[in-house]
Image (cartoon, helix red, strand yellow):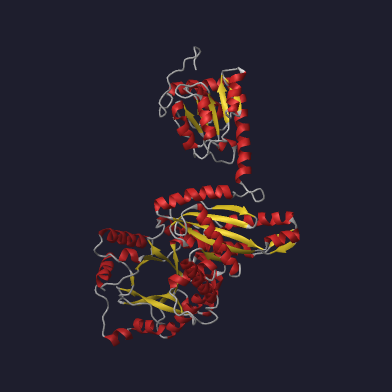
Amino acid sequence: MDSTGTAPEAPEATERTPAGALSVAREAARHAQAAAPAPSAAPSVEAGASAVGDDDGGGTSPTDLTVMMIDDEPMLTEVIGAYLEDAGYRRLVAVNDATTALRELRQRDPALVLLDLVMPGMSGFEILQAMRRDERLRYTPVIVLTAASDPDTKLQALGLGATEFLAKPVDPSELVLRVRNSLVLRMYQDRLANNDPVTGLPNRRILMDRLRACLARALDEGRKLALLHVRLDRLQQLQATLGQSAGDELLRAVSQRLQGRTRRDDDDVRSARSRPTLLSRLEGDEFLVLLPDLDDSEVGARVARRVLQALAEPFRIGGDRISVSPSIGIAVAPDDGQTPEDVLAIAAGAAALACASGRNTYRFGSRQRNQAAMERLKLEAALHHAVERRELRLLYQPKYDPVQRRIVGAEALMRWHPAELGPVFPDRFIPIAEETGLIVPLGAWALQEACEQGTRWAQQGLADLKVAVNIAGLQLSAGGLPELVEELLGRHPAMRGRLVLELTEGVLIDCGAGVNEQLQRFRRHGVQLSIDDFGTGYSSMNYLRSFPLDELKIDRSFVKSLPEQASDLAIVRAMTVLGHSLGMRVVAEGVETREQHACLVQLGVDQIQGYLIGKPMQADDLAALASGRAARAAGTAAPAGS
């Protein structure tokens, strides 16, 4: 209000304060504080309701929270904003049109409101009254800005729910102090209302709010979410034996382990818009894990298995070793339910089923998913004994050199034939092996078998036939792979210069800086290195230059449409030129037709691999093909274009 009591015309909510007025306001504020200039990174206070930062009012420090200023004088909100920015506040919202204030309050949900009482269109008293009737805004603290000093005005504002008063003109030191105190109190109250007092995790209220929002998003966008209900069996018995204090310490230790193992892997997060996992404590011996924005419901099972692994190691509480037995129920929404209450009930029921099934396991709320989960558990149990039961074997897919017109190598491909289950395809058992760590012993077996077979081929006169073996990231990160390869080459010297290790781009990058040292060790012992499935991952020239690679394999997805698809033709040509410029031989995978073969030969690809040359086959059949016996027996010729 001006000195005559007449309110100036309020600007439109979307207008910004003119640059000159903003400069004057800031200068006045700084002189009043006798403070140093504000940091250059400080954001401007925007007119209308454009908050700086998130609009949920959340944060870990008072300066992270959103403060909304509602006053019809833009100059005053600029001055107050300058004071607060100099104190470190970054999330400031200015509303200069009182008639839009309630809409902006509901949209922004600020942690604190600075409110003028006398404004045109809608008074501060009316805004206060409306806020206290609104479920979301009912407890938002409000500092009233007023030039009035009469008790009736203050009593009326207090009666409507004001929490503090600031007299106009505003004293900067008092403003900053009252804002800070109000926000600290808000954070404390929020923590009491929203967090479990024992573990500090979000409580049921926060979980249900987030679940409701994520459900709505899943329904709108056609995606899924998973809710894991984790029950710690025997916790009440342990608390009765050890005491409440030890029981609380155990709960805190459990929550710390869960926080480290319930985050989704990069492969689980398909979209940059995916929201993070929420871990909360429901009550007693129950925890909840919310996994929003899923494209694949199997993510819930993967996280459940990580939880079981995390809690398998005993806890040390007060000198005692304590073991817990988790039972995990998984609900997948919206398939299993479309309300938060239904999803929670289904997850709880699945946890009870897991407990009845023997504990230390998980179950889905869906019968169909439970059946799939049980089949997976059977596969995992059988895979543990695959090597000792001699259920694994290697098949070999030939690699053909069109210039030399002969087979020059083979890729070893693992196959599993468990006696009780029948043949299991690699796309089913390899992911299980990688997730459980079994890929390390299985990979070691494959390397040993490939070296033994390569030695037998050398003894048959195929001494220049290279043998490629796929290597998983866990084999590199687990340690010991260079030593194993060196030991095998010592026992099979004929494999020096003939053993090829195939790694994907993702494996090279995920294993970190230490992988280059391992690759250099391989190279020193005559092992060749191939980058597999090139073009499907990072496809970075920088990575190709960084690692000592001998071979680049073009993924089959770029080959299948040749020669008709012009874009794939250009990509394969560019990959071939790139590989050759870096001194690598180039291999094309997935070649199935003579037209593809002829096109690739014309593009300068060095080697061809695919069903046109041969499907994965037994070692003896590969030897016959490589020596020419199979071709002569069948009366066939080399592929067209060779």
- Residue at the (60%, 37%) spot, across then down: 186
Q: Is residue 577 visible?
A: yes
Q: Which residue is most to the top?
A: 4
Tell me: 520 left or right of 327.
Answer: left
Give the left or right position of residue 401, taking residue 325 as reference: left
**Does the rendering let one see residue 515?**
no
Residue 429: x, y in percent? 47, 72
Q: Image height check: is 304 above or below 104?
A: below
Say which quarter of the image contains residue 352.
bottom right
Looking at the image, residue 92 lies above or below residue 514: above
Question: Where is residue 182 drawn, in percent x and y?
Answer: 61, 32
- Say above or below: 91 vs 611: above
Q: Quadrant of residue 464?
A: bottom left
Where does residue 404 sit, x and y in percent of width and height?
Answer: 31, 75
Residue 476 horizontal/vertical position (percent) = 52, 66
How many numbered marks, from 0 up?
Answer: 0
